[in-house]
Image (cartoon, rainbow, N blue to C red):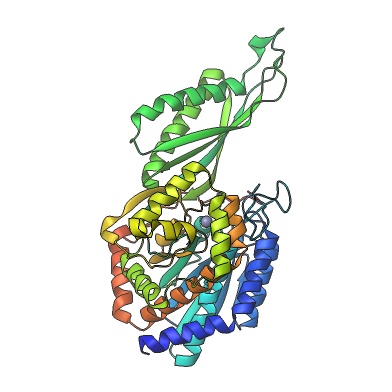
Amino acid sequence: MTSEYAAGLVKEAVDRREEMLNGLSDDIWNYAEGGFQEFRSVERLCQALEAEGFSITRGLAGIPTAFQGVWGNGHPVVGLLGEFDALPGMSQEGACAKKQAVTPGGYGHGCGHNLLGVGALAAAVAIKDYLQNSQRPGTVIYFGTPAEEGGGGKTFLARDGVFAGVDFVYTWHPGSINQMRANHMAATLSKTYEFHGVAAHAGAAPHLGRSALDSCELMNVGCNYLREHVPSDIRFHYAYLDAGGRAPNIVQDHAAVKYLARGPYIRQVMEVFERIDAIAEGAALMCGTKVSSQTGAGYSEFTQNVTLARVLDRALHEIGGPVWDEEDYRLAKAMTDSLTESEKEAQRAMILERYGAGALEDKLAHPLDTVVGDYTPEKCTFVSGATDVGDVSFVVPTAKLNVATNALGTQLHSWQMVAQAGSSIGRKGMLAAGKVMALAAIYVMEDPALLEEAKTEFQNKNGGVYHCPLPADAVPPKEI
Ligand SMILES: [Zn+2]
């Protein structure tokens, strides 16, 4: 298949379903469901895939909102990752340039995962059209992956072998620019420590009590001393989940603290947790209490499979970014007018770097990305954000695309991001992302040598070994 023909095919496949895809994205945006609770969103996605002839399996890895939709037969097998979870406290009116909740305190799509999930579905159905049209062997699998925000749903799926047999994976993330990023994204792991002591009257018989709260405090002191003796790019933070209750005149017999550590490599983060575990044991020993711990969510580091990423880069240049109209520019300008002064400074710096000084005034007045940036894998930079796509990248060669779905300067996890994820700007970026991923997947499926190269790169990077940060018996929570 020539590249012109393939590009035409994916454009037609997505454009033909535009109304269905936009409706699906808006519905998921409206449902705005939290991690592991995305039941209505999953229902809609499964219905849409079933209507396209995909066969659905729900409850992957024992997670009710994890599912897959499969179409086709044999190899190569391409996987698309769809996310659909929303963030707490981020409820916001769609396409509205003023901070205004739909439901005060409710959930909102502050990371644009309604677009992410449906953009991946757009790619899946376009690849189906290609397989049907070309009569070539091959399979496309849409993976519905819940609770990316704080739950690390994909890590459970990777641990339980859900991606076995998949040759390569494409995914994307909403943002403000059209670009294949050369990032090394951070690894993180969280763990909750619960201390169990003995209650006693704090005035009359404190010698009979064993304080769980003292244990937490000593653990935190120990960990604060630990900071000096870990690599400088390792960070860890803690929050009290249970400070033992409201009564100071009772020796607290229960207390719990949650730790989150992050760093460039999951291996380093897990090593740090071995030491945090020892400090927790030490604190319990000092106080005569007992400690138990439970791992929460784990995210291994993510870096692109460069071979697969170069193909996405080619497809992104061929398809191009979203095409904006006056209404989009008007909303984008209103959105950026609402930024704080420091956010505006960051926006100017970004525009200067991407477009040069000559274009500054025009881009400030029309703050939507209109170019496609070049992929520069030789300039890989560390970013402190984490994604559970990292764990998928340890079990399958994986690459991730970024397409503009919001105004230049919009911050992730902001009310402005929610508003634009529910607007025409977001929907246009979503459809473009679907086309790009589908075209790139076709290029890989048609070129066995390229796929082999991607697999060799994967083997060389990881040695084919995945050390899942989650213990074998860790189970996902019912909600985040
Ligand atoms: Zn996200």
Instruction: Look at the image and tell me whether residue 173 can be seen.
Output: yes
Image quarter for residue 5?
bottom left
**Is 247 located above or below residue 2 in the figure?**
above
Direction left: furthest residue: 378
Is 356 situated left or right of 65 in this image?
A: left
Image quarter for residue 93?
bottom right
Direction top: furthest residue: 204
Instruction: Look at the image and tell me whether residue 85 can be seen.
Output: no
Q: Position of residue 312 (x, y in %)?
A: 38, 71
Residues 372 and 18: in front is 372
Q: Position of residue 63 (x, y in %)?
A: 62, 59
Q: How many numbered marks does the figure carry?
A: 0
Residues 83 and 66: in front is 83
**Is 462 located above or below residue 251 in the figure?**
below
Image quarter for residue 307?
bottom left
Residue at image location 32% in from the left, 81% down from the top: 448
Residue at image location 42% in from the left, 86% down from the top: 6
Residues 303 and 395: in front is 303
**Is 444 located above or below residue 395 in the figure?**
below
Q: Position of residue 460 (x, y in %)?
A: 27, 62
Residue at image location 61% in from the left, 64% down from the top: 423
For the N terminus, give its image quadrant.
Answer: bottom left
Q: Position of residue 127 (x, y in %)?
A: 49, 81
